[in-house]
Image: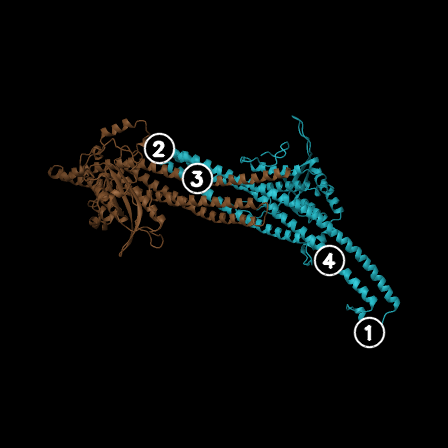
Chain colours: A brown, B cyan
C-alpha cells in the first residue's frame, strides 16, 4: 500500500480522477465470477432476508468457485487473499493536513476500483476524514444491525498526550482505516450497502453529516424494543460470548507483555549505547588495539540501530493491530447483545400473544411472526459473520505473529552480519601480523 | 593465506571459522603460552583440576570453611597411541597460598610485571550472579583464573625459572617454610614504601611516566567497561525473561482455539526456550569479563613497576645530592670559608678555631665518606640502569602479550555474540513456523 509523504503535509485539493493512478491498477483482470444480485438494492436493508440469499453469492456460484479452486487451501479462499472473486477494491492512503479558520484536520484519499453495476463508474477517488468513516460506521450499524461491523481506530485522543498530526499517529490511524474499509468491502452484505456506495463515490458527504451527531448509543437504543428480558441465551451464542470474553482477556495480556518488552528494550538500549562509547574511548589510548576496539564500538552501534528498528515496528505495527482486535471483539459482543434483545422481544411478544390467544382465540399476530423472522434472520447472519470473523481472525493473527517473528529474525540477522564482518577484520589483521613476523 | 607454522597446534582461529567456541578460543591462548616455550612448560603440564571445600581451625583457633584447589602436574611428553597418560602428581593449595607466592614474586622480581590473581571477592556482578565466595559458579571461575595465573608464571622467561615457584607446584608440605626462609619479607617494607610514598623525582624517566599514565587510563576504562557491561547484562536478562510470559499466554489462548490451537501452543514453547536461553548466554559472557578483569588487575602490577623505578631513581638522586653536599663540606673545610651554615662552623667561630689536627681528621673522615658515597652512587646508578633495562624488556613483552590476548578476547566475544544471534534466529524461526501452521 503506498503511503504519501508525511513530513510537511501539503495543502488540500482533490485531483481529477483521470490524473490519479489507482494503487491497485496492477491487479489482475478480468474478474471471472460476477456476483449474482440483480440490482437488489434492498438486500442490504431489510432484516427479513433468509439465510441462503442474504449473501449475494448464491449456492451455485459458491460451488463453481470450489470447482475452480479445489486445490487451494481453505485459507486462500479467504476473502482477503483471493483476488479472483473480488470485484470491489478499496484503498486508503495519502494523508494530507487541512487548515481552515475553524479547525485543522487530516483527510485521506479513498480510492475505489470496481466492476459492480451498483456503481456508476469503474473508478473513484475521493478524500475523506475520520468523521466520515465514523458516519459510515454508524450508518452501517443502523442499517445492518444483524451484522458485525468492523471497528474503527479510537476516535478520541487526549490532546497534549498524543500528537494528532505526528507522522506515526497518522500512519497508524490510516492503516486502521484502510483495514476497516477493506473489511467492509469484502463483506458479502455490507459491501452492497448504499451508504458505503455514497462514502466511496460521493463528492461531498457533508449533507449527510447531520446524523453523525447522534451517538452510537442513541442509535442502538432504537433496537431495544420495550426492555424485554432474555430468559436464556442459546448454547452456541453462549459459547461465542465466552470465547469473546476469554479472547479479549488474552489479547489484553499480550498487549501488556508487548509493552513491557518495549520498556525493557528501551532501557537495554540506553545501556548498550553507553557500552559502545566506552569501547570508542578505550580505542583512543591504544595503538595496535585501536582498530579492533573501534570495530567493536561500531558493531554495538549497529546492534543498537537494529534493535531500535525492531522496537519501532512493534510499537507501530504490532500493538495497534492488537488493540484494534479488542475493539472488534467489543463490536461482536454488541451484536450478540442486540441479538439477545431481538430474541427477548420475540419471546415477550409470543408469550403475550399466547395468553391472548387462550383468552379470545385471536390468530397469531403478524408482529409476532415478524419477530420470529427477525430472530431467525439475526441468528443466521450472526453465525455466518461469526464464521467469517473467525476465519479472518485466524489470517490476521497468523500475519501479525509471523510479522513479529520476522522482525525479530531481521534484528538478529543484522547483528550477526555486523559481528561476522568484525571477525573477518580482526582475523585478517592477525594473519597480516603473522606473515610480517615470518618475513 | 597460510599460517606460518602449520605443523604445530593452531594458534588462532582460521579465517571465517566463526564456529569456533569460546572454549576453543581460550585453549588457543593457552597454546600460545605453551608455544612461547619456557623450559618449565616444555617439561611439565600444569592444571588446576578441581576445587573442594574444607573446614579447619585457623590461626585464631576458629572454625572456618575455605576452598582448596587441586594442582596437577604431569611430564609434558607425547603419549603413544592407545596408551594411558601417566597419572599426574597432585597437591592441594588454598587461595592464601597463591597470594603468598605472588607476594614473594613481587618482592623478588620488582622489575617484572607479575601476573595477577583472580579476584578474591566477586565484583562487577550483574544481579542474578552470586557475589558469594562459596557459590559454585564463582569457585569454578576462580579455578580457571588460578590455572591461568600458574600458566602465565610458567610461561614467563624469567619467573618460570624460580625455585620457589617450582616448589609451589611440587612440594605441598614444606613449601611455606621454604618461602619464609628466603627472607623475602624484609624486602616487603621497601616495597610498601615504593607504593605509598609521596616522593618527587627530579628527572623522571619519560617512558615510565608515559607507561604509568597509560596504565591508569587502561584501569579506568576497563573498570568502566565492566560496570556498564554488568548493567547491559541485567537489562538483556529482563528482555529475554519477559518473553517467557508469551509462552504462558499462548498456551492459555490455545485452549479456546480450534485450528489455531496447536500452532499457538508450540510457538509458546519456543518462547519459553527463548526466555531460558539467556542464562547460558550470560554465563558464557562472564568468561569475557574475566579476561578483561585479568588485564584490569595487570594494570596494578604495571603501576607498581613504575613506582619501583621511581623509588630507585629517587634513591639515586638522594645519594647524588648527598655526595655533592659532602664534597662541598670538604671544600669549605679546606678553604676555611663557610658557605654552608652549620652548627659546628658557628660554634667554632664563637668559641675559637679548631686545631690543625682536628681539622685534618675531619677532612679524612669526610674523604672516607665521600669515597663511600661515590661507591654508593656508582652502585645505585648501575642498579638503576639494570632495573630500567630489565623492566623495559619485560614491559615490551607485556605489551605484545596484552595486544595479542585482548584481540583474542575481542574475537571470542564477537563469536559469542554471533552464537547468541544464531540462537535467536533459530528460536524465532521455529516460532514463525508454528505461527504459519496456525
Q: Is residue B203 above or below residue A178?
A: below
Dot 2 and dot 1 within a common chain: yes
Q: CA distance from mark 2 to mark 3?
A: 28 Å
Regarding mark 1 in the picture, which secondary structure is present there?
helix
Regarding mark 3 in the picture, which secondary structure is present there?
helix
> Residue B340 or B253: which is nearer the viewer?
B340
Q: Badge 1, how many Cα within 10 Å: few under 14, some, many 20+?
A: few
The chain letter under disc 4 is B
Asked whether disc 2 touches disc 4, contact meaning CB atoms under 8 Å apart, the reply is no
Q: Is residue A83 above or below residue B384?
A: above
Left or right of A244, for residue A360: left
Instruction: Say which mark, if any, is on residue B317.
Output: 4
Dot 2 and dot 3 within a common chain: no
Residue B90 percent coordinates (x, y): 69, 36
- Which residue is labeled 3 in the image? A410
- Which residue is labeled 2 in the image? B259
- Which residue is labeled 1 in the image? B350
Asked whether disc 4 touches disc 3, contact meaning CB atoms under 8 Å apart, the reply is no
Regarding mark 2 in the picture, which secondary structure is present there?
loop
Dot 2 and dot 4 within a common chain: yes
> Residue A88 or B285: which is nearer the viewer?
A88
Please identify, in this view, whether the residue under mark 4 or under mark 1 is nearer the observer: 4
Q: Residue B160 falls in which quadrant of the image?
A: top right
Q: CA distance from mark 4 to mark 1?
A: 35 Å
Left or right of B354, for residue A323: left
The chain letter under disc 2 is B
Asked whether disc 2 touches disc 1, contact meaning CB atoms under 8 Å apart, the reply is no
Residue B247 percent coordinates (x, y): 43, 39
Q: Badge 3, how many Cα within 10 Å: few under 14, some, many 20+?
A: some
Amino acid at each position: 500500500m503506498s503511503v504519501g509523504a508525511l513530513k510537511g503535509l501539503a495543502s488540500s485539493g482533490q485531483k481529477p480522477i483521470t490524473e490519479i493512478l489507482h494503487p491497485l491498477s496492477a491487479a489482475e483482470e478480468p474478474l471471472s465470477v460476477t456476483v449474482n444480485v440483480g440490482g437488489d438494492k434492498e438486500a442490504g436493508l431489510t432484516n427479513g432476508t433468509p439465510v441462503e440469499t442474504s449473501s449475494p453469492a448464491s449456492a451455485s456460484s459458491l460451488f463453481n468457485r470450489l470447482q475452480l479452486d479445489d486445490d487451494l487451501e481453505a485459507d486462500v479462499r479467504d476473502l482477503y487473499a483471493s483476488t479472483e472473486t473480488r470485484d470491489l477494491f478499496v484503498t486508503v492512503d495519502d494523508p494530507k493536513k487541512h487548515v481552515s479558520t475553524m479547525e485543522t484536520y487530516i483527510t485521506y484519499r479513498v480510492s475505489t476500483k470496481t466492476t459492480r453495476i451498483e456503481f456508476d463508474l469503474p473508478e473513484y477517488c475521493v478524500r475523506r476524514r475520520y468523521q466520515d468513516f465514523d458516519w459510515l460506521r454508524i450508518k452501517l450499524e443502523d442499517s445492518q444491525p444483524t451484522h458485525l461491523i468492523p471497528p474503527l481506530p479510537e476516535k478520541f485522543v487526549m490532546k497534549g498526550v498524543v500528537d494528532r498530526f505526528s507522522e506515526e499517529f497518522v500512519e497508524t490511524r490510516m492503516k486502521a482505516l484502510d483495514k476497516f474499509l477493506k473489511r467492509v468491502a469484502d463483506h458479502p452484505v455490507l459491501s452492497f450497502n448504499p451508504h458505503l456506495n455514497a462514502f466511496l463515490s460521493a463528492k461531498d458527504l457533508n449533507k449527510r453529516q447531520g446524523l453523525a451527531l447522534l451517538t452510537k448509543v442513541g442509535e442502538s437504543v432504537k433496537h431495544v424494543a420495550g426492555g424485554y428480558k432474555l430468559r436464556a441465551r442459546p448454547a452456541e451464542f453462549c459459547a461465542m460470548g465466552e470465547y469473546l470474553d476469554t479472547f479479549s482477556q488474552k489479547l489484553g495480556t499480550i498487549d501488556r507483555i508487548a509493552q513491557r518488552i518495549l520498556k525493557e528494550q528501551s532501557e537495554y538500549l540506553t545501556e548498550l549505547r553507553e557500552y559502545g562509547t566506552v569501547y570508542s574511548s578505550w580505542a583512543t589510548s591504544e595503538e595496535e588495539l585501536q582498530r579492533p576496539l573501534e570495530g567493536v564500538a561500531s558493531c554495538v552501534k549497529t546492534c543498537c540501530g537494529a534493535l531500535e528498528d525492531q522496537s519501532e515496528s512493534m510499537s507501530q505495527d504490532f500493538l495497534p493491530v492488537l488493540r484494534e482486535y479488542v475493539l472488534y471483539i467489543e463490536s461482536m459482543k454488541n451484536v450478540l447483545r442486540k441479538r439477545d434483545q431481538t430474541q427477548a422481544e420475540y419471546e415477550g411478544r409470543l408469550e403475550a400473544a399466547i395468553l391472548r390467544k387462550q383468552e379470545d382465540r385471536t390468530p397469531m399476530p403478524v408482529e409476532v411472526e415478524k419477530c420470529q423472522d427477525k430472530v431467525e434472520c439475526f441468528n443466521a447472519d450472526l453465525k455466518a459473520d461469526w464464521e467469517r470473523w473467525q476465519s479472518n481472525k485466524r489470517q490476521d493473527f497468523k500475519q501479525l505473529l509471523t510479522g513479529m517473528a520476522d522482525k525479530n529474525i531481521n534484528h538478529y540477522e543484522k547483528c550477526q552480519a555486523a559481528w561476522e564482518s568484525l571477525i573477518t577484520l580482526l582475523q585478517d589483521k592477525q594473519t597480516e601480523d603473522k606473515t610480517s613476523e615470518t618475513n | 593465506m597460510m599460517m606460518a607454522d602449520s605443523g604445530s597446534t593452531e594458534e588462532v582461529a582460521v579465517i571465517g571459522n566463526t564456529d569456533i567456541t569460546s572454549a576453543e578460543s581460550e585453549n588457543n591462548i593457552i597454546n600460545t603460552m605453551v608455544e612461547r616455550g619456557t623450559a618449565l612448560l616444555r617439561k611439565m603440564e600444569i592444571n588446576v583440576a578441581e576445587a573442594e571445600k574444607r573446614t579447619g581451625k585457623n590461626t585464631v583457633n576458629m572454625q572456618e570453611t575455605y576452598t582448596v584447589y587441586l594442582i596437577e602436574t604431569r611430564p609434558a611428553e607425547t603419549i603413544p597411541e592407545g596408551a594411558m597418560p601417566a597419572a599426574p602428581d597432585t597437591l592441594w593449595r588454598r587461595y592464601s597460598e597463591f597470594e603468598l607466592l605472588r607476594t614473594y614474586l613481587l618482592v623478588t622480581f620488582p622489575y617484572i610485571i607479575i601476573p595477577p590473581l583472580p579476584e578474591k571477592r566477586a565484583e562487577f556482578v550483574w544481579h542474578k550472579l552470586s557475589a558469594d565466595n562459596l557459590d559454585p559458579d564463582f569457585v569454578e571461575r576462580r579455578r580457571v583464573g588460578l590455572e591461568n595465573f600458574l600458566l602465565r608464571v610458567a610461561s614467563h622467561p624469567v619467573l618460570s625459572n624460580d625455585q620457589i615457584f617450582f616448589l609451589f607446584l611440587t612440594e605441598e608440605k614444606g613449601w611455606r617454610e621454604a618461602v619464609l626462609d628466603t627472607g623475602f619479607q624484609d624486602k616487603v617494607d621497601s616495597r610498601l614504601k615504593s607504593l605509598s610514598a609521596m616522593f618527587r623525582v627530579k628527572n623522571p624517566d619519560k617512558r615510565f611516566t608515559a607507561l604509568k599514565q597509560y596504565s591508569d587510563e587502561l584501569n579506568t576504562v576497563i573498570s568502566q567497561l565492566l560496570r556498564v557491561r554488568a548493567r547491559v547484562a541485567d537489562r538483556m536478562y529482563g528482555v529475554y525473561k519477559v518473553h517467557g510470559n508469551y509462552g504462558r499466554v499462548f498456551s492459555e489462548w490455545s485452549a479456546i482455539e480450534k485450528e489455531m490451537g496447536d500452532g499457538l501452543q508450540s510457538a509458546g514453547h519456543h518462547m519459553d526456550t527463548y526466555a531460558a536461553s539467556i542464562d547460558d548466554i550470560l554465563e558464557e559472557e562472564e568468561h569475557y569479563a574475566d579476561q578483561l578483569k585479568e588485564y584490569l588487575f595487570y594494570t596494578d602490577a604495571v603501576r607498581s613497576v613504575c613506582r619501583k623505578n621511581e623509588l630507585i631513581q629517587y634513591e639515586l638522586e638522594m645519594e647524588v645530592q648527598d655526595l655533592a653536599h659532602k664534597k662541598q663540606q670538604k671544600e669549605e673545610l679546606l678553604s676555611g670559608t663557610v658557605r654552608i651554615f652549620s652548627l659546628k662552623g658557628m660554634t667554632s667561630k664563637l668559641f675559637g678555631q679548631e686545631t690543625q689536627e682536628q681539622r685534618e681528621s675531619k677532612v679524612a673522615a669526610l674523604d672516607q665518606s665521600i669515597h663511600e658515597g661515590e661507591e654508593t652512587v656508582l652502585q645505585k646508578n648501575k642498579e638503576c640502569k639494570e632495573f630500567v633495562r630489565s623492566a623495559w624488556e619485560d614491559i615490551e613483552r607485556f605489551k605484545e602479550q596484552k595486544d595479542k590476548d585482548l584481540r583474542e578476547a575481542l574475537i571470542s566475544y564477537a563469536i559469542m555474540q554471533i552464537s547468541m544471534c544464531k540462537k535467536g534466529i533459530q528460536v524465532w524461526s521455529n516460532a514463525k513456523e508454528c505461527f504459519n501452521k496456525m
